[in-house]
Image (cartoon, grey):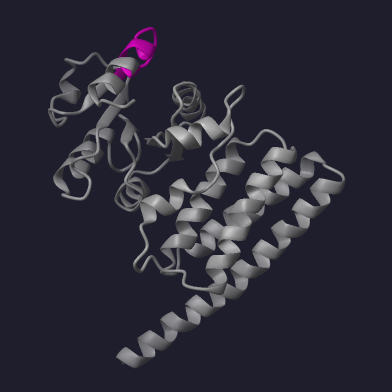
Amino acid sequence: MTKNVVDLDDQMLSDFRDEAQDIINSIDVILQNARSKGEPGHLTAIQREVFNLRYKGKSVAAPLINLTSHRLADYVTSCKELNAASIEDIQAFVDKIENLLEGDMTADGRDTAEFVRELPSKRAPDIDPNWLAKANVEALLVIPQRSMATILERELAACGYRSSVTQTSFEAIELAVRTRPDFIIVAKTIDELTGIDLANALQAMPKTRGIPTAVLTSDAPNHPSLQDLPCRTAIIRKGNAFGEDLAEALARFNIT
């Protein structure tokens, strides 16, 4: 029985490797076409292929592939157009995934946090991506609303900080463990778990309890719904107090 299970796992991983290689080959072709004659449809096609790769990767034990495809999906979602710089960034992701497919897709002996920091940074208007890479400060944003996440990302990029986004609390736990960001900002309302639940879960685990965490909310700091937050959690209010609360949280976390 055990051998049959192992054989099935190996077969699923082999099938995923073949399917992922087909997806990567397709993205490569789209990038080549975009270099010669860029069209709006090229970016949409790449986004579709990347999300297909993410979907297929969830069924197998390939953490490095999944981390890279998450970062790539995050990148292409925020990408407004395929220009020379974004094409080269996407190509760097593709080359990384291709190398992983040809070798070890697991995280055995690899520092996954260091691994993801070597990947290209998302490009923000008027922000030099080399500056973000040099600062090497990573934020994990657990924000279901893409519009709110974009606002927060711009604010952090202006400070020289890189960020990655997830919309789900359960993926946030995995990313926090594997990527060890310098700080985490969670929305108060996420999914089955609230931001308060997630902050408590991260605080309870030895691997993540040292990561500074803030909750983004419309409520006042003394609101009853926030009473179960761990004492070290910062509160960032939406609205007029947003900028001041964010700056205060970063100072409190000693993020420089």
Q: Please identify the quarter of the rendering in which residue 249 is found.
A: top left
Number of numbered labels in the structure image: 0
Hey, which residue is sitting farthest right in the picture?
A: 37
Closest to the observer, 229 or 33? 33
Instruction: Tell whether position 114 is magenta.
Output: no
Residue 129's spot in the image, x, y percent? 56, 33
Hey, which residue is sitting farthest front in the picture?
A: 134
Q: Is residue 185 left or right of residue 121?
A: left
Residue 90's spot in the image, x, y percent? 64, 48
Please report the residue visible at 45 percent of the width from the left and 50 percent of the height from the top.
Answer: 116
Instruction: Tell whether position 242 is magenta.
Output: yes
Please report the residue visible at 25 percent of the width from the left and 26 percent of the height from the top.
Answer: 253
Q: Is residue 204 left or right of residue 22?
A: left
Q: Which residues are magenta?
A: 236-246
Closest to the observer, 83 or 185? 83
Q: Is residue 148 left or right of residue 198?
A: right
Closest to the observer, 178 or 120? 120
Q: Quadrant of the N terminus?
A: bottom left
Please report the residue visible at 76 percent of the width from the left and 46 percent of the height from the top.
Answer: 42
